[in-house]
Image (cartoon, grey):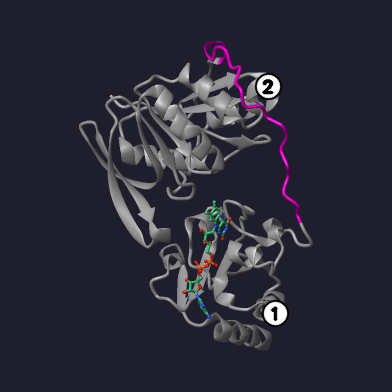
Amino acid sequence: MTAIYAYIPFVGETASDIAAEYLTAAKKIDASAPVTAVLTGSEEALNKVAEEMTNLYTEVIKIDHADLAYPNAEVVRKALVNTIPADAVFLAPHDTFGMDLAPGLSVKMDSGYAADLVDFDGLDDSTLTAVRQELGGAVSTHVTIDISQGAVLTVRPGSFAPVEEGGAGGTVVDKSSDAGDLSVKRKFIEVVVAEVGDVDITKSDVLISIGRGIEDEDNIEVAQELAEAMNAVVSCSRPIVDAKWLEKSRQVGTSGQTVKPKVYMAMGISGSFQHLGGIKGNPFIVAVNKNPKAPIFQVADVGIVEDILDFMPELTDAIKDL
Ligand SMILES: Cc1cc2nc3c(=O)[nH]c(=O)nc-3n(C[C@H](O)[C@H](O)[C@H](O)COP(=O)(O)OP(=O)(O)OC[C@H]3O[C@@H](n4cnc5c(N)ncnc54)[C@H](O)[C@@H]3O)c2cc1C
């Protein structure tokens, strides 16, 4: 029988949102498979998050070691190889850390590997079909993975609906003594916290987020006027930061800020997974884009095919009239 292990990252004492998403993913892999949460870390923070995870998972493995206090994939990999069954299906997030951790882990475990999965489409004997997105989300492809010898799979954050029900009443199993020798060559140096900048986009309930569709630096004023009218804040996609039109602290995405607004207005943003990876908390998404086939429309609650340079001033005027 398939046994699924889900790696739960956490920052401070807060587990990643993917903890609740894995359970939906696991059901789609094999609804009858037991799912075990796996946490690595050190002392109080680890204990607290592991305890919290018993709400979602019936079994929670914790591996506690001073060297696991910081995100060093080489150390985590060593700890996991000694604790997880070699034939397990192991889930990790497809984020910077997961991308560092997972390929080497599959090599060490001599198991299958597939990355950046957004859906699962059935298990036939030991052949699992998974869905990936290519070309910035414009095309979905199906891949098969032989999981008979286990598999390491990275799951794109935000792709599976989080389970809402808690109350799993699980138990924490301490496997720290199984981790073995964790000495590695790669040394952790420091965590550099991103600058907040003049505005903290993570605190705003409404974001007017602009992408390359804004076309010119001078047009940013149009977005700013709309933001003022809506009591919102302007955020952006990465090309706007690369062009130095807005500061890095306003960038939403996997290499920018993670935001949890109530309303997200995506203005001239195509909807790359790196951008969408920074939008959490299931906000109401309004997307305005000239291209009716833009991938952003797949995740938008309301999609408007329109030129943003016409749409934004009109909306600003309409709101002011109200
Ligand atoms: C390692 C890595 C990390 C990354 N991290 C991030 C990240 O954190 N955040 C991020 O955003 N990106 C990130 N990216 C970049 C990402 O892959 C995309 O390139 C980027 O998100 C695209 O930004 P965009 O949607 O603004 O631009 P585009 O993809 O060029 O889309 C522009 C959209 O605007 C529309 N448009 C054009 N003109 C108009 C108009 N006048 N009116 C209406 N619509 C119009 C077009 O139809 C198009 O859909 C990362 C990439 C890598 C490789």
Of 90 and 216, nearer the camera is: 216
- Specify whether residue 304 is painted magenta: no
Quadrant housing the C terminus: bottom right
The residue drawn where x is 57% and y is 40% is 16
Amino acid on which the number 1 mark rests in the picture: Glu
The residue drawn where x is 72% and y is 49% is 194
The residue drawn where x is 57% and y is 15% is 176
Q: Residues within 10 Å of mark 2 (few under 14, many from 20)?
A: few
Percent from the top left, x then y, of residue 186? 62, 27
**Which residue is at the far right?**
198
Q: Residues within 10 Å of mark 1 (few under 14, many from 20)?
A: few
Q: Which quadrant would residue 229 be assigned to in this image?
A: bottom right
* Residue labelled with disc 1: 221
Q: Please, is residue 25 above or below residue 237 in the view?
A: above
Percent from the top left, x then y, of residue 232? 68, 69
Q: Which residues are magenta?
A: 176-196
Position of 16 compared to 136: left or right? right
Position of 297 compared to 73: left or right? left
* Residue labelled with disc 2: 43
- Specify whether residue 189 is painted magenta: yes
